[in-house]
Amino acid sequence: MYQRILVANRGEIALRIIRACRELGIESVAIFSEADRGAQYLELADEAYCVGPARPADSYLRIANVISAAEVGNVQAIHPGYGFLAENAHFNEVCRSCKIDFIGPSPEAMAKLGDKNAGRALAKEAEVPVVPGSDGLVESPEEALQFAHEVGFPVLIKAVAGGGGKGMRVAANDLALKSALQQAKNEAEAAFGNGAVYLEKYIDRPRHVEVQVLADNHGNVVHLWERDCSVQRRHQKLIEESPSTNVDQKTRDAMCKAACRLIQLADYSNAATVEFIVDKDGNYYFIEVNARIQVEHPVTEMVTGIDLIKQQILIAGGEPLPFEQKDIAQRGVAIECRINAENPRKNFQPSPGKIDRLVVPGGFGVRFESHVHSGYVVPPYYDSMIGKLIVHQPTRAEAIQTMQRALAELRVDGIFTTTPLHQEILSHSAFVAGRVDTTFVERTFSTD
């Protein structure tokens, strides 16, 4: 097993990994930018090194600086967390060339699944249902129009790289498609350095359901059931839960087995999330694979009792999975609310600044994952998420009640957060009844 691991990330996920290392008896080496200098969570690491100025491109994304910190810190492995370099196959290769283990899949498996178009091709080979889509990349408006006329409008334009809704557009007619195609390409090029896009038939008002998978280096692949991430805004998830409210057991089993087939075919090891959309008739279709740990991984941890971060580290260190599929059950219901430093009443305008007072909720079945504290200054340079509030209870009704109580207890004075919107969503009759889809928030709640 490793003696020292470098945590190539910041904030909440960095703290989560540092804690897992501590419990495994592994020393941790943290990195930070000038904007994060002095953050309290860095004190829990055994060492911490500055990797550059505030801008991510000059610090957390600068591969040479991260590798230098790893070499100075004398680590055997790097955990990338999520975001930043987590799905960067080149960084993965650099780690390998420097004889440092990357806690995640191999560069080859990452490349197979990181490109959404290649992932679709592999899904077809694994006999996993996919949304009808273009045969490869779409280069010109003429190609896009030909596809749209064959499958019918509306169509969805998707960037092959990255995620988070960037490089994604819906078009309902010829004129909109020509404009949206160029917009998607430009946005993807700016965000990921790759403007390639492909097209899919747009599925109206789908559910977004994803399957958590773990695979070791000994041929063992298991799923840890599904999470429903349908409550989102502009493809950014707001609330996640497990199990999904509208997936029957037959569909659940089929979807989870399909996810395992795909991961096995890709010769993939470590944690992966296979994402699907589910239409109004209960048909499920593959979207993409996230070759990393997900923000919403605590939801799965709560219903399965399995620590995913520890499993990532153990798998990378060569350990076989300590359980089989028959050992993994879904127990109770877990819900997670992402607490972002944003003003949902002003079109989710970012709200950086000083947190004058933080009151963290507690009680039975409540978990708060965060690196912030009273007096913490939320910097304007990074993702606006400042914490994740998770609850776990025997039934969904009890989980909703507990989350409402916990949200009411949570105080983050000095900045705006998304907490009030979460309270509205959890009180809405459609959410309580489990009748939501990916357009629910935009259709139901005013954000201007």
Image: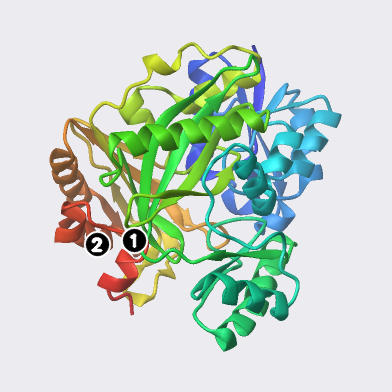
Furthest toward the right, the residue is 97
Furthest toward the bottom, the residue is 175
Q: Nearer the viewer, residue 388 or 326?
A: 326
Q: Nearer the viewer, residue 315 or 56?
A: 315
Residue 420 - label: 2
| Residue at the spot 46% in from the left edge and 44% down from the top edge | 295
Q: Quadrant of residue 206?
A: bottom left
Q: Position of residue 425 (x, y in %)?
A: 23, 60
Can you say which quadrant of the picture contains the N terminus? top right
Q: Secondary structure at mark 1?
A: loop
Q: How many marks?
A: 2
| Residue at the spot 31% in from the left edge and 29% down from the top edge | 303
Q: Check the image and tell me how it is coloured.
A: rainbow
Q: Position of residue 170 (x, y in %)?
A: 51, 73
What amino acid is labelled 1 in the image? Thr
Residue 85 visible:
no
Task: Classify residue 332 as left or right of residue 160.
Answer: left
What amino acid is labelled 2 in the image? Pro
Q: Secondary structure at mark 2?
A: helix
Label 1 crowd (10 A; few <14 / some 14-19 / many >=20): many
Q: Nearer the viewer, residue 115 or 43?
A: 115
* For residue 396, above or below residue 379: above
Q: Quadrant of residue 195?
A: bottom right
* For residue 28, above or below residue 252: above
| Residue at the spot 41% in from the left edge and 22% down from the top edge | 306
How far apart are the alpha carbons under marks 2 and 1?
7 Å
Residue 277 - label: none
Q: Position of residue 410 (x, y in %)?
A: 24, 49
Image marks 2 and 1: residues in contact by CB distance under 8 Å: yes
Residue 167 visible:
yes
Q: Which residue is mark 1?
A: 417
Can you say which quadrant of the picture contains the C terminus? bottom left
